[in-house]
Amino acid sequence: MSLTSTSSSLALEHTLSCLHKCSKEVELKQIHARMLKTGFFHDPYAITKFLSFCLSSSSSSTFSSYAHHVFLNSVDRPDTFLWNLMIKGLSSDQPESSLLLYHRMLSSSAPHHNPYTFPFLLKACSNLSAFQETTQIHAHLTKLGYGNDVYSLNSLINSYAVTGHFNHARLLFDRIQEPDLVSWNSVIKGYTKAGEMDKALTLFRKMPQAKKNAISWTTIISGYVQAGMNKEALQLFHEMQNSNVPPDKVSLASALSACAQLGALEQGKWIHSYANKERISIDPVLACVLIDMYAKCGDMEEALRVFNNMKKTKSVQVWTALISGYAYHGLGGEAIGRFKEMQKMGVKPNAITLTAVLTACSYTGLVEEGKSVFYTMERDYNLKPTIEHYGCMVDLLGRAGLLDEANRFIQKMPMKPNAVIWGSLLKACQIHKNIELGERIGEILIGMDPNHGGRYVHMAKIHAMGKKWDKAAETRRLMKEQGVVKVPGCSTISLEGTTHEFTAGDRSHAEIEKIITKWRAVRRKLEGKGYVPELEDMLLDLADDEEREAIVQHQHSEKLAVTYGLMKTKPGTTIRIMKNLRVCKDCHRVMKLISKIYKRDIVMRDRTRFHHFRDGKCTCGDYW
């Protein structure tokens, strides 16, 4: 090798090494200009290195646009590898450009596609959810003889599944004689995204055990979590462990999310200890899920411990998870304190953070603090309030009894108020007994949301408060005529890894007779302390048969759950209950009395927040 070629090679490598120091487009252009001046840009190796750097995931997004420009205007007669490199590199961030580049490739003088071209194109289609383009590429690859290429078929299956055309995906899958791991996972993932969990599980069960990997298990587990089928998700997680497939971070996060929704603290703790035992690093994603799980299971001390144990800089998501936890627990002061602390640490809040802070203010009656946060969003954080933030403000004002101000606030909203916002104000009217405003809002709500049973129930209660019995009965009759069903109250309690579920007047539990006998004994003790149930006599004649039975027997679901907890746990053990609806006044009072008489801490999560009962008092201060 001559001295000239050696020095030229060294100069090229030096120039290419400068690429990795680029952080601005102007620097990239300077290196490009140097390569043009020295003639290096005629070298296929140099061109490939330059374009690969521009398209790499670690580079600035503007670099990929520059690579696209350079490729179209400065590269003569690119080979198949370069075409594929560009199509692949643009398929994620600029999928439209990726597809347009393919059309340009087809119009060039020589054919440049090969089997690797089509998976990259179909990735672009998936990112665009582009069904028509997927069918066109399907036809093209079949015509070119790549119809049996496993990589192309898997990409087609995924693209059809992503665009919602599961029949196409399944037909292709069924035609593959020996589907590989990607084939199985793609179809299962498609079914889970569509909420077709029965089909997803059936296919998962058919999948050869030897082929199932962590991605296969995670796909089906996360699908069940997203579908709200959390008990089934945890069952599958336990199956995964028994199958000797080690859970990865994604499957652990999915299982922890299921624990959070079920309030399954013990199972969540076990998963946390498993991660520590296996030395799985707690990254920001796992930290968020752990904090959320502990908070939603009623253990803020452990949530805070996870937060404090994070050694790396805490992301906005981690801060938001902690602030949200304080909000659930009605700890408004702590939430605002952490909100201020995160800003001192240089972490800028996002829209979700501000929703959490406003929620914390709402649950604890911090009206002025909430107003201050809301009205400085755009100025201090460059965030325009969304409908969720407006909803928090209506809830804040309504809970505080500022009903006219809440109503005026709604009238001045820059967007049309949704049923959630009107529903929040209607509930506030019921709590604060503003019958006139409640009736007006109730009419609006039933017109907007005629299939929501809660709207009719609240409206009937508003009428009943005003002793307008005919109107209350008429609202109930309208509800029945429309075929609208009220969501039944449901409470769960997790004991020794098993979640027990109760509904109002429920008799399906295997030990229901013992539970009812125990509840009667508990009730006698309560009555001995002066307890008189608030039976809501005004609505007794309006309730359906099951509801009437539950009211008469005082057997709301949370009472059955706490009774079961008293039966099955040792004296002094904290009882943890999850409720799908807002806890009623009578049950709230019962929990306070039980906590005092039986010397038990009771942690209850209702539809929106936590109640910690101890020695006859609740942390909500009867403000919920």
Image: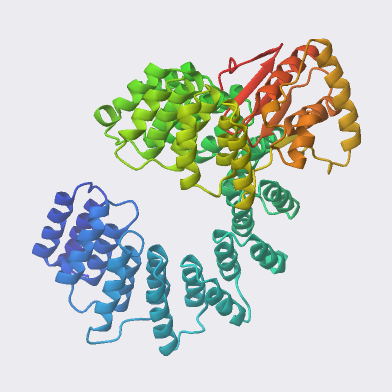
Q: Is residue 226 above or below residue 465?
A: below
State the colouring used for the structure image. rainbow
Most foreground residue, 22 or 164: 164
| Residue 293 location (% of width, % of height) | 60, 34
Q: Residue at x 41, y 18 (%)?
A: 367
Query: Residue at (62%, 55%) from the top-left corner?
Result: 214
Q: Position of residue 483 (x, y in %)?
A: 63, 53
Q: For residue 53, which quarter of the picture?
A: bottom left
**Which quarter of the figure has residue 38?**
bottom left
**Residue with the most extreme left position:** 37
Is residue 277 positioned above or below 588 on the image? below
Residue 423 against residue 138 in the figure, above or below: above
| Residue 55 visible here | yes
Q: State the quadrant of the C terminus.
A: top right
Q: Is residue 554 left or right of residue 10?
A: right
Q: Position of residue 576 (x, y in %)?
A: 71, 28
Q: How many marks?
A: 0
Residue 334 at x, y percent in the picture? 48, 18
Q: Is residue 521 left or right of residue 269?
A: right
Quadrant of the rendered structure where residue 82 is?
bottom left
Q: Can you see residue 312?
A: no
The residue positioned 44% from the left and 36% from the top of the image is 421
Residue lying farthest to the front in this orientation? 470
* Camera-nearest residue between 79 and 388: 388
Q: Nearer the viewer, residue 117 or 261?
A: 261
Q: Quadrant of the N terminus?
A: bottom left
